[in-house]
Amino acid sequence: MNFLNEIVSQGRRIIVDTFSGGGIERDAPFSPEIPEDLRQWLPDLFDRFPIVFPWQKPVPVDPALHNVWIFDNTAFRTPRQGDERPDLEEVKDAKVSKPTLLEGPEGAVGPAMRPSGWEAEFVACYFIKNSGKDESKVVAGIAHALNIRDDDLATHKRIAKRVQPFIDTVLPNRTLRITMDGKEEQTLGPSSYSGISTGNHELHFDPPVPGEFKSTPVNLPPPFSIPSRTILAEETGWSIISDIDDTIKITMTPDPLGILNSTFIVEEPDPVPGMSELYARITATLNSPPFFYLSASPYNLYPFLKQFREKYFPPGTIILRDASWQNLGGLITSLTNNTEEYKTSRLGRIHSWLPKRKFICIGDSTQSDPEAYGNAARKFPGWIRAIYIRKVEGIAAMDEKTKNSQERFEKAFEGVDRNVWFVFSEPRELDRRVEELAREGDAVVGGRTLLSGVRPRPLLQAYYP
C-alpha cells in the first residue's frame, strides 16, 4: 500500500510540475534555490501545490474548507494627475473587485462608483484546512535536528502548530469577498500559484483620517480567518522601515539551527533588548509614524510574526517573501540567500506608495540590510533620511569580522551622505539622533536639500571595535 501511495504521489507531483511549475516560479521570483546539503537533513514539504489546469476559472474561497489570512496594510493617497509613479501597481479593475457600498446590517445599497482618493495593497493567503501531509514526519525531522526528546510532547505539539502553514495545501486561482470597515465590499483575487492574492484596491468610502479600519472576509469568521488592519498614511510626515530578524527579534539568522530553534521551538520569540523601548520612543517623538516591517521571512510565518509584533512593537504592515520551495530548507535560504535583491525590490514598492514621506530605515548586519538600504538611498535621493544598522555579535555561524567591518558599511553606503547612516550596538545610541531628526526636518543647506535632509553637524563616529 505504501508503495502504491508513493507512486500516486509521484504522479501527482509530475502533473503539478507540468501544468504549474513555470507559473509557480514566475509568481515567486525571489524564492531562493535550496542547497543540496539542506535538502539532505531537512524534511520535504511535498504536495503544498495542488493540480491547477490552465483552463480552470477562478472560484471563491469556501468558508467550510479553507483558511484565510489578510495581511495588515497601509492605505495611501491615490496619485493626482501628473504624479507619475512607474513602480506603482495599477488598481484592480472594478470588473474584478466589484466594489459595493453597504449601509449598516441591511446590506448593499448599490455599486460603488466614486473613489475616495485612497487606495491600499491588499495581500491575502488561502489554504485548505488541515490538509498538510506527513505532518508527523516533518515534526520528527525538526525535532531530530534540534535534539528534542521523543517524550517532550509540549515541544512536539508546538512544532506541529507552527509547521502547519508550511505543509497545508495552498489555493491558487481563488477569490475572496471582503468587507472594509463595514462600509464597502470588494473582491480580492484571483490568487497566484502560491495561493496569494495581491493587488491595489481603491476605497469608495471616506476612511477615518487619521486612523485605521478593519477588513474581514465575508462569511468567514475567526479562527478560520485573520482579518486585516489598515492604517491611513497621509502623503507627508515620517515613516519607519524595519527589518525583523535580528533587528527586533532574536532569530540567529546566520545559523540554520538557530533559525529552526527560534521559529519552531521557543515558546515565545524574544525581542532584541532595548528595541521595543526604542520603537516606543520613536513613535512618541515622530508623532506615531506608519511602520513597515520588511522581512525576508517566508509568508508562512505571518501569524507567528504578527503575534510577536503585536506584543512588543507598534502596529504596521508586515511584508514577507513568497515561496515556491518544497523543502523546509527554504525557510533558511529565504533568510540567508538573495535578500538584497528581494528587499531592494520591496523598498521600491513602498516608495511608490509614499514617495513624499521621510523614511528612517532600521536593520542589522547579519544579512543584506546595509546593501538594500544603500541601494534605495541612491535610487531615491532624499527619500531615506536616516539608516540605522544594528551591529550583531555572538552568533557562531556569522563571519563577524567581515559582516561588522567598517569597509563593508562604507561600500554598502557608497555615495550616501555620511550623516545619514550609523552603526549601533545599543538602541539608546539612537535616541539623540531621532530627536535631532524630529527637530530639524527638511533643512536646506546652500540651496539644496541634503540626502539626509538634515544640517551638517559634528560627525558622531559609528561604533567599531
Image (cartoon, rainbow, N blue to C red):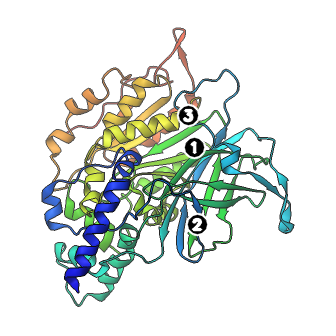
Q: Earlier in the sequence, mark 2 or mark 1?
A: 2
Q: Compute the Cα span from label 2 to label 3.
A: 28 Å
In the image, is residue 150 above or below residue 347?
below
Image mark for residue 381 = none
Which is more foreground, mark 2 or mark 1? 2
Callout 1 secondary element: helix
In the image, is residue 350 above or below residue 324?
above
Q: Nearer the viewer, residue 30 or 206?
A: 30
Q: Compute the Cα span from label 3 to label 1.
A: 30 Å
Question: Is 223 situated left or right of 111 in this image?
Answer: left
Question: Is 288 situated left or right of 303 in this image?
Answer: right
Q: Within 10 angstroms of label 2, few (less than 14), some, or many (20 or more) residues?
A: many
| Residue corresponding to mark 3 | 88
Q: Earlier in the sequence, mark 3 or mark 1?
A: 3
Q: Amino acid at mark 1?
A: Thr
Question: Is 158 situated left or right of 441 in this image?
Answer: left
| Residue corresponding to mark 2 | 61
Q: Position of residue 58 (x, y in %)?
A: 57, 57
Q: Amino acid at mark 2?
A: Val
Image mark for residue 285 = 1
Q: Residue at x 69, y 56 (%)?
A: 213
Q: Residue at x 58, y 44 (%)?
A: 289
Q: Earlier in the sequence, mark 2 or mark 3?
A: 2
